[in-house]
Image: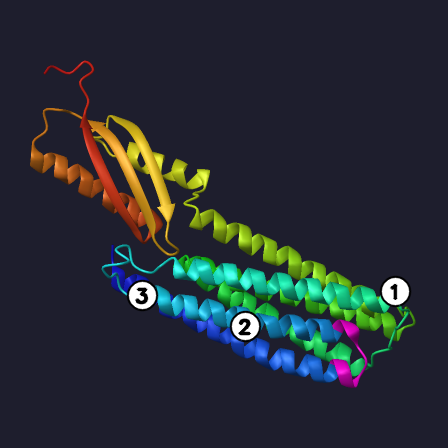
Amino acid sequence: MNNKSIFDNLKKAERGAKISILAYLISSSLKLIFGFSYNSSALIADGINNATDVIASLAVLIGLKISRKPADENHLYGHFRAELISSLIASFIMMYAGIQVVIFAIKNLISNDYPIPTIETAILALISTIVMLIVFYYNFNLAKKINSSSLKAAALDNLSDALVSIGTLVGILGSIVGVKQADSIAATIVGLIIIYTAINIFKDATHILTDGIEVETIEKIKKIVSNIEEVIEIKEIRGRSHGLIHFIDVTVTVNPNLNVIKSHDITVEIEKALQQEFFACETLVHLEPYYNNIKK
């Protein structure tokens, strides 16, 4: 496993988080200013959403920086799971923001308080949508390339924000053309989207933190190991993830007449084959003798 490559990928993920923070800072400031100045509840809600995204992105950035710390006597596997903890923190912040946005919008609907926004707010919502789609595309592709769960969470947050801005735009335009409730309804939808995204990020992070692994990943491992010529039978496969790194335990049977050198070569071959598929993984291979139909 090449730790240098992993740490390089963490630095790349940090760059994606910094881009998100900058985009959210600018977007949040403009939306709140325009929302209050030109009477748009949806734009204010969207601005509050982006403000919490700044905090969530900072949590992701801090988690990525901690992940780059090398292993020590208290963290023999390194600090890679720190980025997953940052994803959890981000999900809590987003959940709180989403609930507050929904409460704010519903209060307006109940009180029949429907301020009419101006065209300036619609233009800002359109520009924000385009910017967040660009940021999402960059971060999502980078997350896939370096296999970063926290950057993927940040990218999905970018996408939800782009969708939120679209909803905000629709609500503002609806209010402008005469559907007075449209702006507040859009704000409610914005809040629900934030909550939904937060729940998904929380589920993904807790799945990995509790040593969950996808069935598809186990099947890939089985296929790779079974294609090693000297492997007779796969007895057990276990795996878990520490963010960017997969830890895989494999128990296989081989010809009991093999010498130590040949047995060692088999373990190395299995390790290399898995690293080609998963980029960064640490594999523990246990060999057992296969006696069935083989002379002792």
Q: Amino acid at mark 1?
A: Ile
Disc 1 versus disc 3: nearer the observer: 1
Q: Amino acid at mark 2?
A: Ile
Question: Which of the 4 image quarters holds residue 289?
Answer: top left
In this rendering, is residue 21 above or below 85?
below
Mark 2 to mark 3: distance in Å?
Answer: 24 Å
N-terminal of the pair, mark 1 or mark 3, is 3
Residue for point 51% across, 59% down: 88
- Asked if the stretch drawn in magenta spans residue 52, the answer is no
Q: Amino acid at mark 3?
A: Phe
Q: Check disc 2 and report the residue beneath it.
A: 55
Residue 166, x across and y down, in percent: 72, 67
Q: Which mark is residue 188?
A: none
Q: Check disc 1 and report the residue beneath it.
A: 110
Residue 112, x across and y down, in percent: 91, 69
Q: Check disc 3 and report the residue beneath it.
A: 7
N-terminal of the pair, mark 2 or mark 1, is 2
Residue 156 appears anywhere in the view: no
Mark 1 to mark 3: distance in Å?
Answer: 52 Å
The kind of secondary structure element at disc 2 is helix
Residue for point 33% across, 66% down: 68
Residue nearest the observer in this picture, 186 or 106 = 106
Question: Which of the 4 image quarters holds residue 110?
Answer: bottom right
In this rendering, is residue 281 above or below 52?
above
* Range shown magenta: 35-42
Task: Please give left or right for residue 292 compared with residue 238 in the image.
Answer: left
